[in-house]
Structures are given as structure tokens and as C-alpha cells.
Amino acid sequence: MMNKAAAAATMVKTAIRRSAVKTRLVSTYADVISPEYDVSTPKMPAFDYSPPPYTGPTAAEILKKRKEFLSPSMFTFYNQPLNVVDGRMQYLFDENGRRYLDAFGGIATVSCGHCHPDIVDAIVKQTQRIQHSTILYLNSAIADFAEALASKLPGDLKVVFFTNSGTEANELALMMAKLYTGCQDIISLRNAYHGNAAGTMGATAQCNWKFNVVQTGVHHAMNPDPYRGLFGADGEKYAKDVQDLIDFGTSGHVAGFICEAIQGVGGIVELAPGYLSCVHDIVKKAGGLFIADEVQAGFARTGSHFWGFESHGVVPDIVTMAKGIGNGIPLGAVVTTPEIASVLTRRSYFNTFGGNPVCTSAGHAVLKVIEKEKLQENAHVVGTYLKERLTALKDKYELIGDVRGRGLMLGVELVTDRQKKTPAKAEILHVMDQMKEMGVLVGKGGFYGNVFRITPPLCFTKEDADYLVDVMDYVMAKM
């Protein structure tokens, strides 16, 4: 009898211990995710890296200094801004060592993955040798990268000018177009985004981020948006607006037309089929140059092609690029033909730090990583899979009005009424915050600020794609 009693007591104690352990595990998991989520929440893919302990200031302390000492125009995502202190490949880590799937940072700067060892190694090695201005001396790192970059472009696009950012690149491109043609009129699209300086802010037009600054000689064409545009997916009808601007808004001539192949900040808007090829011909007949802004769509992001413009069957006169070109290093570039490039000999153009040896070493390493790790192919395969899963989610939730984009440059537009396409401004903020609490970071954009911008590093996997969609599904199901 005593043995049975002892056995029973042992069983009770074991059950209590197991219950306690289970309670602790559930509690720990809930603490990591959020108190309102239970163990049925989607599980983030495993990743073999733990960041070193963080000993710096807290998010609250940083936010306090930021409000006091930094520009009031700066903004953050989320109700409680994230203090990012570490990163590896497609993941970021906060001050507490918590891991987040970065489904947005690829468009911001990082193409190959945070702290990619090959790129870090190239930067460190060059920094240990020399980091210097490029104006007066020679350096092989700069010339080698220019040659490698030119090899990725079609036609006679082979003369490279290096800058520090996409804004500088687009400003230079616009200036070159005006010098080459002798005209001052520039045509850009409504809802476009081209940078933060006077000229590029003028070309930015009606973008949601209010970057428009009125500039003489800048004309804004109707946006060829297949989802919200007046003519749906009929690219030729939108192109007629460009012809009208040239005929009635200018003297019949134009310096250039600047355009993103897929609008990034504007909400991942794919241009209506046939639009770019038609506009290319119109602009060329008017004596203008066609400028392709590849700051966000370039460098293999669309998957099917290395450059966004290639899917439209056009060859630009000038191509601008930045962001992913340096995987986080400040670097931009303008590539054009020898004939157009020669116009800068009429001016004393130089850029003190544009194309310095450290930045160009990083850029060259990026090209090598994209090729070695077949990241363009990965962007196509994983991006296609992710878009299919997001489209299936659209069939499940009326909140999703549209899924669009190519490769790993995808947009999900939220609406409260599909027929009226009423922007779901409050709902997107809620979903973003809840996804962040579950460890997934996505961007936001569009004219109304109601579009998820999903633009992860190109090393994103199908497992990552599944986790992203499962988390979005989970959050929307709870609404």
C-alpha cells in the first residue's frame, strides 16, 4: 500500500513539475511574441546565430535624444519604435536579442543580406589599405567596379559616374539630360519618388510622403496604375498624356522623361503593360532622353531580369541606381553612353566621396555575391512563391484589395471596401504593429499609405515567405 501511495505521490509531483515547465515555456514564448498570442502562433524558421549582449542605451533613451536633437521631419514605424542593434542576412535583432524577419530592409539598402561576410570582408580589407577621395588619383577598386557594372547593362551604356546616394544620382541624370538636349523641361510620373534634393523633389510629384517641391519646367504625367488608374491596364492610353504634355505643356521638345519600372515608395505599382515602350518612342521623337530610375527595382530584385526596365523591352539613355548597389554602404551611380557623358566636360563636375575605394569595393562585392549565390534566380523563385501565397490570402480576406509586383518587390494594398477601393489607413497600422510583435517587419507606402511594401534581402527563403504569410494570416484572422 505504501509503495502505491508513494508511486501516486511521485506521479502527482511529476505532473506538477511538467505543468510548471509547460507553463514557463508558454509564458516565455508569450513574452517573446506578445501576451495575446498562444503557442499555436506560427513559428519563425530556425537560424544559427545569436547576437552578442547589447549594453548601449535603450529604445526610450534613444527616442528622447532623437526628439531633441534630430530633424522633426524624421519618422518611425510602429507604436513602440524598434531599436535595431544587430543583423545577419535576412534577420535583425533588437536590444533584447530578439530576432525579427526583415521583409522590408532589402529595398532600403540591403540586397544580399545584413552583414554578408563577403561584403564585410571587402569593406574591411579596403579600409585597412586606403579610404580616399577619387578626384585626383587613380585606384583600381573604382575602375574595376565601373567595368563590372557596365557589363551588366545593355547597348552602349558603359560610362559610369559614382555618387553617394540615389538622390545625387537622379539629380545628376536630370542635369545631364538638360545639358545634352539644351531643354529644361522634364516629365515624370505622378506618385513617383526620385529623391530628396530640389530637382528630384520636383520630379517626385504627388507621392504620399509629401516630397513634392514645385520646380519650373517639371511636368507630371498621369500615373499608369493598373489598379487605381483611370484607364486600368491600357498602357497606350496613359502614354497619350505624355504626348499631350509635350504638345501643349512644352515647346514640343523635352529634356527627358524619368521613371521607375516599379514604383517603390508609391506603393509597389507596376506600370500598365505597353506604357514604357510607347512613352520611350514619344520622348525620343521629341528629342528627349529616357532615364530609368533603378534605385529600388534594380540589382536582380525583380527576379526575371537584373534591371526593372528590361521587362518592358526598352533601352534607356541613362540609368540611375543606389540603395542595394552597396548593401548598406552609401553608394549610387549613373550609367550612360559616351556621347551623353561627354556633356559633363562642359562643366567642372566632380563628387568628392562618390565612388571612393571603400564604397566601390563594397559595390563590386555585391555584384559577385549576386552571381555566386544566384540571388536573381532566388528572387524569381521565392518571389513567385510568395506572391502566390499572398494572392491566396487575398481570396480569404476582403481587407486585401490588390497583390502586385515582381520577384522580391511585392505590394499588398489594404482596403475597407473592394468596390470603392477605400484605403484601409487605420487597419494597415494595426496589422503592421501586430506583425512586428510576432517578429515580422514589413514596410508601408502608397499615395494613401495603405500598401504593404514587401522587399526583403534577396537571400529570403521559401520558409521565410511561409512565415511572413502565416503571420499576416494569423493577425488578420484575429481582427
Image (cartoon, rainbow, N blue to C red):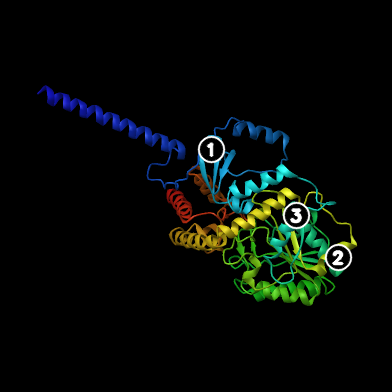
Spot occupied by residue 100 in the image (x, y as percentages of width and height): 52, 44
Spot occupied by residue 215 in the image (x, y as percentages of width and height): 81, 59
Q: Residues within 10 Å of mark 1 (few under 14, many from 20)?
A: some
For label 2, the residue is: 343
Mark yes or no: residue 202 visible: no
- The numbered mark, 1 or 3, whose residue comes first in the sequence reads 1
Residue type highlighted by circle 2? Val
Is 160 placed left or right of 311 in the picture? right
Mark yes or no: residue 63 visible: yes
For label 3, the residue is: 140
Residue type highlighted by circle 3? Ser
- Residue at x-position 45% and y-position 46%: 44
Circle on res. 386: none
Q: Residues within 10 Å of mark 3 (few under 14, many from 20)?
A: few
| Rendered position, 46 above or below 189 | above
Query: Of residues 348 and 148, which is closer to you in this image?
Result: 148
- Camera-near label (1 vs 3) is 3
- The numbered mark, 1 or 2, whose residue comes first in the sequence reads 1
- Circles 3, 2 touching at the beta carbon (< 8 Å): no
| Rendered position, 251 above or below 6 | below
